[in-house]
Amino acid sequence: MNTSTPATFSRRGFLGIAAAAAAVPLLAACAPGGGGGGATGGGSGTLKFWDMPWGPQSYADEAKAIVTGYTPPSGLPSASYQQIQWNNFYQTFSSAIASKTGPAVSSGAGFQAFQFAEQGAIAYADDLIESLRKSGKLEDFLPGTVETMKTPEGYAAVPWQADLRVLWYRKSLLEKAGVEAPTDWASYIEASRALAKNGVYGFGIGAGAGNSVGSQVLLSLMVNNGGGLFDKDQNPDAVTDANIAAMDFVRELIALGAVDPGAASYTADNVFEQWTNKSVGMGWHTAGLQHVLDDDDVVVASPLTAYSGDTGTLGYVNNLMMYTNTPSQEGSEAFLTAYLDDMKVLWDNKLIESLPVMKSIVNSEAFQSDTEWVKIVDEWQPVSKPLSWQAEALFADLAAVDGGQGLQQFTQAILGGQTDSRTALETLQTELETATS
């Protein structure tokens, strides 16, 4: 699994994936992989930490070293490390939880904790949050990140990384086209028009098999224009003037030749290839695009001002969660506290592409040496909004929305020019209502 994979799957919801897997496996099935941990579950004498492949093998090696190097307080259990592949991960977690052989603590999909909490499998993190508050460590989290974990029943998890959709551009191609980096939607249209004259696409995007970034980009534009998929009461609310205008903006880009005609079928690798061969000059993508491409010619722009006058983008706060099936809840909290203290090395060595949510890591010398990461944290993180926006709190139904087929089909319809914006959003509204009913 390459380093781009976590960007595609890190927030994938459970219900949609489970439904797809029940009919035809989404990807090849796999057994729980990784090192460190044996077959003992969270209810054994060892506290089991399950982690996902958030980067290359060197990421797993370093994460395992953090876990196996953990020295628990007297009387509390030690910890083991096991990496779980994204392939069929829903079945891996759900079956292990049902058989009480699952983890005591894990990373995982962005809405995983909220869904398993409704099933009674998550140990709420309120006591841990209070402990972090008393020690002063809670102040280390970036504004708004801890709050996204709050539910009416308590904190479902603790944040540890942020996955944002941001605008990137290739400097040399804009210079060749004689345009500056856009600052608003109007100048984005003009820059795309100039790029098109040179045979370069101004809106790099794909919505093929396994590529959820495309739908996330369209949602980012809705948020950018002051819209979103839900109202303040968590009800689906896709057919709004703000969302229609955002999709009309995309259709305008398609009409002027800024979008590859095959974009609706492009995988993540197809999109990366377009960036690499310089057929794309601009596009929204993950915060780690420059690292994946390993190309200093690709840099991040500032957030754009939409036609509405708003700025914003879609952001996911991935989290670490605790489970009720644990050898010691006190042990789970002690381990998770230590892991939060020690995980800085993952960003020091640039082993992870998502952004940290802790100020101490952001302010570190290693992080500050990365100009693009710093700009994203300074300019994009403050204007990012969750998938639940306009409702501020996350909720379990987001798993079905994010992991279902409705968003993918909507994106393919827009990029394929198959329908007008309102009709596409009306179809999406119906899908949202079904997923959240």
Image: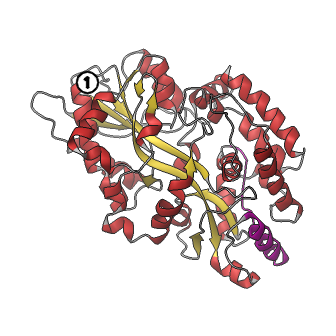
In the picture, which quadrant includes the C terminus? Answer: top right
Q: Nearer the viewer, residue 288 or 218?
A: 218
Q: Residue at x 28, y 37 (%)?
A: 336
| The magenta stretch spans residue 187 | yes
Can residue 64 be seen in this snapshot? no
Q: How is the image coloured?
A: secondary structure
Identify the amino acid type marked 1. Answer: Gln
Q: What is the quadrant of residue 254 in the picture?
A: bottom right
Determine whether 44 is above or below 399 in the image: above
Q: What is the quadrant of residue 359 in the picture?
A: bottom left
Q: Nearer the viewer, residue 272 or 375?
A: 375
Q: Position of residue 273 (x, y in %)?
A: 67, 64
Q: What is the quadrant of residue 319 in the picture?
A: top left
Q: Position of residue 197 (x, y in %)?
A: 85, 77
Determine whether 54 is above or below 306 in the image: above
> Under tag 1, what secondary structure?
helix
Q: Nearer the viewer, residue 226 or 318?
A: 226
Q: Position of residue 143 (x, y in %)?
A: 42, 49
Q: Residue at x 57, y 29 (%)?
A: 14
| The magenta stretch spans residue 294 | no
Left or right relative to 91: residue 363: left
The total of numbered circles placed on residues is 1
Left or right relative to 210: residue 128: left
Q: Position of residue 202 (x, y in %)?
A: 75, 67
Can residue 20 be seen in this snapshot? yes
Q: Residue reaching furthest left?
A: 74
Q: Residue at x 72, y 38 (%)?
A: 407
Left or right relative to 354: residue 326: left
Magenta segment, which residues? 185-209
Residue under label 1: 329
Mark 1 closeness class: few <14, some 14–19, many ≥20 residues within 10 Å: some
